Image: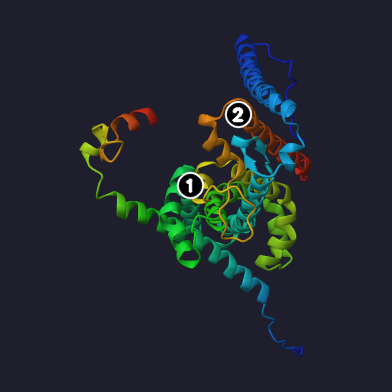
Amino acid sequence: MRQSVKHRRRKIAYTDILMSFLVWAAAIAVTAVFIWLLMDLFWHGTGKLSWEFLTTEPQDAGREGGIASILVSTM
Amino acid sequence: MTYYAKKTSFPQKIDRLLVWSLRGIAAIVGTIVLFIMVFLVLESSSALENIGLLHFFSDASWNPGQGLYNLTPMVMSTVLVVTGAIILAAPIGILSALFCHYYAPRPIANFYRRLLELMAGIPGVVYGFWGLVVVVPSINRLQPPGASLLAGILMLALLIVPTTALTADASLAGVPEEYLQGAASLGLSRWGTIREIVLPVARSGLFTSIILGTGRAIGETMIVLMVCGNVVQFPNSLFDSIRTLPANIALEMDFALGDHRSALFVSGLLLMVGSLILVLLAEAIAQKEIYFD
């Protein structure tokens, strides 16, 4: 014998959807800021990067020349 | 229960060699830390005798040239900038950890974890440099001067998020699989499982991650030196320039003499006491494992 089936309105879990949104937003925000930082560094930096930059000494208090001795000290 | 070997059961010579080497190294490290603390106390004792602890909080201002050593504006600025950074970074860090474990598909979660590890490895100086070149002028357009408490809070939060997220991630990985399976069998939703099962179980680990982040933020010198403006004052709004205790030590140690130098050691001692309180807090919060094999 077929039982009568009660249909119930599906409850929407609003908190779940909100938390999903927040979690994804946090992850995307962090990634976006980091990529912004990296892009800025690359954009302004790669133009100056060259072999002689890495192997010559700083001159004129760092305004010209390279970073060879500073790089060696850091390493 | 897990079985632990008795500490005295080292029959092999190589075991004994290893154990005593490790004990020796631990003793050396402990002694170095003790020496640092004793040195701090000794160096600050002259200022504490000549000037007196009360004057460090009740003088007119911080002006060592005239013998005024009020640390309160700088202590307040340090507390404010660290609190602001934690308020921003703790939720984002914990949400990031939840993202990696419960919301993201496996390849995205792995990519995000590598990204966080990369961010954690970047030295603070790079964040300070970027903050100086990008964030400070942006805030300047909103409200001059750009070098402000807000810039410090933003850059410190950016610094702390990876450490907090990675430690929280590790503590979330310690939630037993059985608990999650039980929650699934009960039909709990994803956020329901997280709120009712995961967060209470991982609570001490999450608090530890926040405290670790606070500890890192308190000591961070270069960022606050570069983006906060270095004016000794009580900040009346988010856009005021401030100077924190670590930045003060870094700025003035080069040319400080006598009582001034000793006063800087007093501020270092204050920072050390603050870190000690944080560590004790972390110890108090950390629970023993609440689940058994």
| Subunit bearing disc 1 | B
Secondary element at image label 2: helix
Q: Residues within 10 Å of mark 1 (few under 14, many from 20)?
A: many
Spot occupied by residue B138 in the image (x, y as percentages of width and height): 45, 63
Q: Are marks 1 and 2 on the same chain?
A: yes
Task: Say whether residue B174 is visible.
Answer: no
Q: Nearer the viewer, residue B48 or B104?
A: B48
Q: Which residue is mark 2?
A: B261
**What residue is rendered at 75% in x and 38% in y?**
B283
Spot occupied by residue A62 in the image (x, y as percentages of width and height): 30, 38
Residue B18, compared with residue B230, is above or below; it is above
Spot occupied by residue B208 in the image (x, y as percentages of width and height): 68, 45
Q: Which residue is mark 1?
A: B226
In terms of image quadrants, where is residue B99?
A: bottom right
Secondary element at image label 1: helix
Spot occupied by residue B67 in the image (x, y as percentages of width and height): 65, 34
Q: Quadrant of the C terminus of chain B?
A: top right
Q: How is the image coloured?
A: rainbow
Q: Residues within 10 Å of mark 2 (few under 14, many from 20)?
A: many
Residue B248, compared with residue B161, is above or below; it is above
In terms of image quadrants, where is residue B39?
A: top right
**What residue is rendered at 78% in x and 45% in y?**
B290
What amino acid is labelled 2 in the image?
Arg
Left or right: where does residue B145 sit relative to residue B89?
A: left
Task: Say whether residue B150 is visible.
Answer: yes
Left or right: where does residue B69 sit relative to residue B254?
A: right
- The mark that comes first in sequence, 1 or 2, is 1
